[in-house]
Each structure stands twice: as structure tokens, then as C-alpha cells.
Image (cartoon, helix red, strand yellow):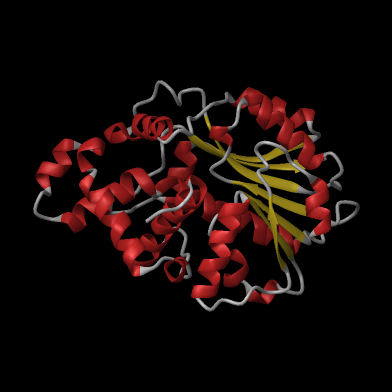
Amino acid sequence: MEHDESSLTSLIAAFGRAYHSKYDTPKIFDDFLANTLISKEEFLTISNNMVNGIEFFNRDIGLRYKDDPKEILKWITHVQLSPTPLARSAYCEKVLLNEIKLGVQQYVILGAGLDTFCFRYPELKNRLEIFEIDHPTTQKFKKKKLANAKLDIPNNLHFVPMDFTATFSYQELIDAGFNYDNKKTFFSLLGVSYYLSKKEHTNLISHLFANMPSGSSIVLDYADENLFEEKGMFNRVENMVKMATESGEPMKSSFTYHEIENLFERSGLLIYEHLTPTMINENFFRNRTDYLSAYETIHFIHAVKK
């Protein structure tokens, strides 16, 4: 497969959701459409690459299941790949659906990748305008995937090609139909904060909420101050940091809770809910009999503009 880095990242994330929907029970987050966006060849290629890379993740597991590639793939997917994306998507959609009941009319997905929310909730087409912001190449890649899957783009879904981590432009959102004067808006920023510097993160949140009405909010995940010291179960946190560096997209920032709280306060937001790794594990991974469990250094935040 030959893709740019951003589309490859979105493809691997979709692979994790597709794998979970196909093979795991009970479901943490059931993205039943993810598999329609991944070809059989892509699913097989990613699976084989994961299995062949087991020595990087854990040599002992590779030896233990050397004759069982399906178990190796399950182990890698459950331990290293899927826990945070599944839990944060489940949390974000739970909050979003409640916010819609409270009057949210616009949903902005920053770094949307191969997100399928719009297609899984067609009943919201007359209640919620959805704006997907992502790198132009990734959006072109996604549109091709949607066409291949014969999924028609509904009128309430708007694509906004933008490298928002470099320069965020509200004008491009407005040109796509966004209203920032009086419509309550919900933002999601998932799997992004680690790759921004603290200054970039602060500037982005400040810019996002500068003109948003009271009650607008955001859900994001962030890494705590232990990110670069914590090894994690089976060294998975250390592996995550190493993989990001080796891919040319190093993780730049981690935060104490006090730093995150101050960051939002400066932009006029209050933290409504904060889920620690322990709370995430209790809410989304309790009583599982497989390998899935919450990452040791990752937190979820729901913050609301005052």
C-alpha cells in the first residue's frame, strides 16, 4: 500500500475499529461501517505487518504464539493498537449525543480521518451539521473510500480540507456553512494533542472558542506527565512513544491536570468531566476476559465554555 502518512494513520485507526467490530465481544465502541472503508487487501496487509512486527512489541508473546498468528494479531490489536481509540470514541459519542439533546447544532471533528459518525446516525441529518477537518490528502483518500463503499455523502456532512495543526482558519469553516455567532457547537480533538507542543495546543483551543457561544464544548484525550517515563503493561506506552518518533511524528507534549485546567481556563472553558486511566478502565473495560484495558497515561476531558 502506498499512502501519505496522514491517510495511513487513518487507515490503521479504522483497522482497529473494524477488527473490534468483527471479532470482539462485548463491544466498547461498535463502528460497524469501518470494515466497509477498508479493502480485504488492506485489512490483510495491515494484519500481516502487525504479526510480522511482534518482536518489536513483545518477543515472549511472539514465541508463545509462534504457530498462532491470529492470537498474535489479537494480542497486538488489544494491547497496543485499540484501547485508547475505542474508549475515546465511545466516550466522545456518548457526550455528543447528550449535548445534542441540550441544543448542540454543529459538530466539528478535528482530524476526522475515516470517521463514520455521520453515516451511523442518519436520523440526525436535519438536526446536526457535521464539519470534518483534516489534511487535504486524507480527505481525498476518504472520499475515494466512501465512493468505493457506495456511501452517498449526506447534505449535513461538510468536508473542510485544512492542516489545522499548522494554521487554523475559521474562514474555511464558514465557507463550508459553519455558523459561529449563535449556534452551540461541539468539537472533538481525538488522538491529536500528543503531537502538538503546549503552545500549539493552547493557541488551537483559544482560537477554537474565541467566538463560540456559551455551552459550546470539546472532548479530547491527552497524555499526563508520566508519558515519557511510564513503560506501561508489556512496555506499550514506551512502544507508543518509540513508534511515533520512528514514524517521523514524535509526541511533543504531556500535561499535569493543573496545566490542562489552566489551559482551558485561559480560553474561558471549565472542565465538566475528567476521566483518569483508572476511571476509563472502570467505565469501558470492566470485566473483560480478553487483553483490552485502558492505557496507563491517557486521560479524557470534556470542557464547556462558560
Q: Position of residue 64 (x, y in %)?
A: 10, 45
Asked if residue 139 lies left or right of residue 23, the reply is right
Relative to 147, residue 219 above or below: above
Residue 237 figure quarter: top left
In this view, the residue in front, 56 or 287, is 56
Relative to 104, residue 189 above or below: above
Asked if residue 89 lies left or right of residue 304, the reply is left
Please give the name of the residue rendered at 49% of the width and 75% of the height, measured from the top-left corner.
Answer: 149
Q: Position of residue 240 (x, y in %)?
A: 39, 35
Q: Position of residue 80 (x, y in %)?
A: 34, 43
- Does residue 25 appear anywhere in the picture? no
Q: How many marks?
A: 0
Q: Position of residue 28 (x, y in %)?
A: 44, 58
Please give the name of the residue rendered at 43% of the width and 34% of the height, measured from the top-left corner.
Answer: 244
In this view, the residue in front, 120 or 177, is 177
Relative to 34, residue 249 above or below: above
- Figure quadrant of the N terminus: bottom left
- Does residue 84 appear anywhere in the picture? yes
- Figure quadrant of the C terminus: top right
Please give the name of the residue rendered at 78% of the width and 62% of the height, measured from the top-left corner.
Answer: 105
Considering every residue shown, the one lying at the far right of the view is: 181
Relative to 191, residue 29 above or below: below
Please give the name of the residue rendered at 48% of the width and 44% of the height, measured from the top-left corner.
Answer: 280
Considering every residue shown, the one lying at the far front of the view is: 2
